Image: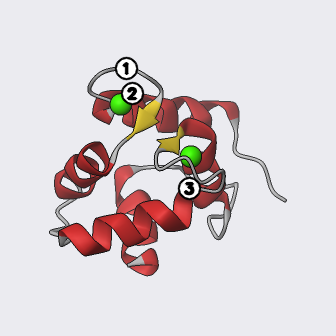
Amino acid sequence: MSKLQVHQLNQLREIFGRFDMNSDGNLTTLELAALLRSLGLKPSGDQVEVLLANMDSNGNGFVEFDELVSAMLLDIDAQELVNQEQLALRCVQVL
Ligand SMILES: [Ca+2]
Ligand SMILES: [Ca+2]
């Protein structure tokens, strides 16, 4: 599996932190929905739940940072910058 560059990880962490409203290290469906809306997406509640379920590899009902990173690694080239457009793209693919 390819790895993200340190600065890409930092960018991702910043995005994650911005939307982890209560800073507990988990994204809930509400927090994930806010993240998606900030990217210009308008997912339905069902779509957010499906997306979260897809990313939630340990099945605890939340998206941890590691899970977000894993989701990004699925088909983003490590040489590319992790920016919000790519995150949006990735989310669109999942939805
Ligand atoms: Ca949270
Ligand atoms: Ca999880």
Q: Are marks 3 and 2 in contact (CB under 8 Å)?
A: no
N-terminal of the pair, mark 1 or mark 3, is 1
Q: Is mark 1 within 8 Å of ligand 1?
A: yes
Amino acid carrying mark 2 in the image: Gly
Based on the displayed image, in which of its 4 quarters is residue 59 positioned? Answer: bottom right
Indicate which label's residue lies in the foreground, 1 or 2.
1
State the separation of the CA atoms marked 1 and 3: 18 Å
Residue on which the image places disc 2? 17
Front residue (pair 32, 53): 53
- Identify the mark at residue 38; answer none if there is no mark: none
State the separation of the CA atoms marked 1 and 2: 7 Å
Amino acid carrying mark 3 in the image: Asp
Left or right for 42, reference 16: left
- Identify the mark at residue 56; answer none if there is no mark: 3
Amino acid carrying mark 1 in the image: Ser
State the separation of the CA atoms marked 3 and 2: 17 Å
Q: How many marks?
A: 3
- Quarter occupied by the C terminus: bottom left
